[in-house]
Every structure is written in C-alpha cells, then in structure tokens.
Image (cartoon, rainbow, N blue to C red):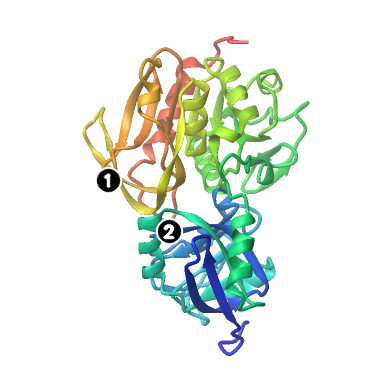
Amino acid sequence: MSSPWERTPALLVLEDGTVFRGATFAGRGRALGEVVFNTGMSGYQEVLTDPSYKGQIVAMTYPLTGTYGINDEDMESAAIQVEGFIVKEYQDFPSNWRSNRSLADFLNEYGKIGIEGIDTRALTRHIRVAGAMRGIIATDTEDVRTLVDQVQAFPGLNGVDMVRHVTCAAPYRWQDGVKPVSLDAPWDDADPRHRVVTLDCGVKYNILRKLDQAGCQVLVAPASTAPEQILGIRPDGIFLSNGPGDPAAVHTVIETVRGLLGRRPMFGICLGHQMMGLALRGRTFKLKFGHRGANQPVKDVTTGKVEITSQNHGYCVDLESMKGAPVRLTHFNLNDNTLEGMEHLELPAFSVQYHPEASPGPHDASYLFERFIRLIEKHKGENRG
C-alpha cells in the first residue's frame, strides 16, 4: 500500500497560464489532457475506468476521495482511462468490505498520476468561467513557461477521433465479462434471448451488464465494423455506445449509423446519441464546461416527469440543427435547456444524452432499457436486410 509520506510536489498548469500547486499521491512525471471536473460524491473508480474520459484530466469536486478503496467488480473497462486525477484530499487508508486495494495503488498499477492538495473549488470555478481547457500535471519541473508552451502545443480533443483509442480490437460477447468470438459464429444458439450488437465507441461495462440483465445476448463489435457485417449476423437490435472526444470527428461511425438506421431497432447513449443526431444530418457543438456528475435534472416531455441523471459529456446535439429532421425531441436538460433525448418518428430508433445505467448514481432512467427491449420485441422477425 502507498504511504502518506510518499508525496512529491506537483504543478497543474492550464493553457491560459493559471497554476495550481499540490502534491502527488500516485505516479510521477507529466500528464497532458483536457482538464474537466466531476461533481459526483462517489464513483471515482467508475470515473477512472470510463472510456469517455480518454484524453482528459479529471478533478473531483467532492473534497475527500479514496475512502472506500478499489474493488474488482466496479470497473467500467479493463483499465484506467483518464490521463490524470485531481482531488482536494486523498484518503490513503480505505475502509470498505469490498475494497482490495487503495486508490493510490490502483493509479500506480496503471502508471497514472494522482495529485492532492489542489484547491478544487477554485479550479472548478475557473473552468466554469473560462471553460474546459488543456492542462498538464508535472512533478519533474518548476518551469511554468516550459509547461505552458507544452500545453499550448497539445492539440486537445476538438476535431480528434478519440474512439479509435478505446474501441475493442476484436468482437466479443459479454457474459459477465469478455468472451472473444468470431463474427462467423457470434451467438450462442442455445440462448433464446434477444441478440443485440453493441457498436463499441468506448462502451461502459455497466451498459453491457444492463443489456444482459434486460434479456439480451450482447455482442460487442469494434467501431470500425461495417454495416453489412453487422446486418450479416442478423441481430435483433443495435446499441450505440458512449465514448470520448469530438463526435463530429468520428466520420466512419457516423456513416455506419446512417447505414443501420431503420434496419434494426436502435438505442444510443451519450456519444451514441450524438452519432444518431449527426447521422440524421444534425450538428454537434462543444459545451463550455460539459455535464459531468450524478445530479443533472432532465425533463421527459412525454410524461412531464423530471429525472435526476448521471452524465458525462462535453459535446451536445444542436437543437436548431434538428429542426426539420424526422424526430421528436423527448428530453431536455433543465439547467441549460440542451437536448437530452430524441426518437425517430418513422424508424425504430431513439437515444438519450445521459447515462441510465449509472452506478453509483440515480436509477430514474433505467426504464429506457425496458423500452429498448419492447422495441426489439415489436420488430423482431421482420426482415430488414
């Protein structure tokens, strides 16, 4: 286990020259990324392993982190995905019956830098005013000018396809874990459940767990998989996953979604929602500082109900760009009125921007998986080629 005296001074330097000083509780060296904040009071293990955070340095706004350690069951992918991790105060001695190692040990295992002692409230306020920006964590120099130059030379995430860094290398079937398969024989013929292909743009494991629990055989396919390959294995439904980065930069996936729309029932979450909007000729734009946390209020205009949702995105589908598209806009964020959900008026397809599978987090929107199953059952057996 890491020890509380193993601290090294560290700098966090933002692209505008703002400097925060702290100390490491894990890792050494430098870490570059887009600096963002998450307002969740728990769930740091899920944040660290969520592929949607690829390319980002994440600051937790809740002041004490590490209290319940790390376990093997709450992973959202096979590894840590964030570039660096920032907390106000790190707790080095976790107390939880499920914990099998400390947060510091976990970060060190994957060679990631974790720093504490940063004024995370001041950092969060700065990002809210100035917007999410590029930054660097460094333990090996006090030369701020050099670090600013390095940050400013970093291209950031705009216009960059980050999906290629997190998608699976080969297809696999989810069976309480990863089971490699071939697209020549992807399904378990003895399993009568609905067959769902998940297009992997950086899928969270808990989405796969929820699909499995809802009654699906779940095949996860690389983001580069062509529409003809997917349709060739005759799935009952198609799921579009979450993922990192600028959705408009993931051209191949946009075209894939366009080629699959209407061919099978389709459900998209987060980046999957954005991909559906882009496939329908909409546009996306970058939010000033994004939505990341477990307390975002979303109104379902169909029922009038407000759901408290877990979210993690820095881009959004432009409302104006969807005017004239054959969709009904179903959900809106009550904080800033951004688009949070839509359904196609003619085809069996719908999507949401938030995460109904979140854990830890609110379960208000878990009904969406049941809705997907009903859509599959309604169209099952139709030959759409």
Residue 164: x percent and y percent?
A: 68, 41
Residue 81 seen in render: no
Tell me where residue 100 sits by quadrant: bottom right
Residue 251: x percent and y percent?
A: 62, 29
- How many tags in the picture? 2
Q: Amino acid at mark 1?
A: Asn
Where 187 falls versus 174 (above or below)?
above
Residue 16: x percent and y percent?
A: 49, 61
Q: Residue at x 75, y 38 (%)?
A: 170
**What number is the disc on residue 335?**
1
Q: In the image, 142: left or right of 67?
A: right
Residue 368 seen in render: yes
Q: Quarter of the image for the C terminus: give it.
A: top right
Where 26 falls versus 34 (above or below)?
below
- Sequence-earlier tag: 1 or 2: 2
Where 326 falls versus 95 (above or below)?
above
The residue carrying mark 2 is 38
Q: Residue at x 64, y 62 (%)?
A: 150
Q: List the single residue furthest toward the bottom.
A: 5
Q: Residue at x 55, y 13 (%)?
A: 381
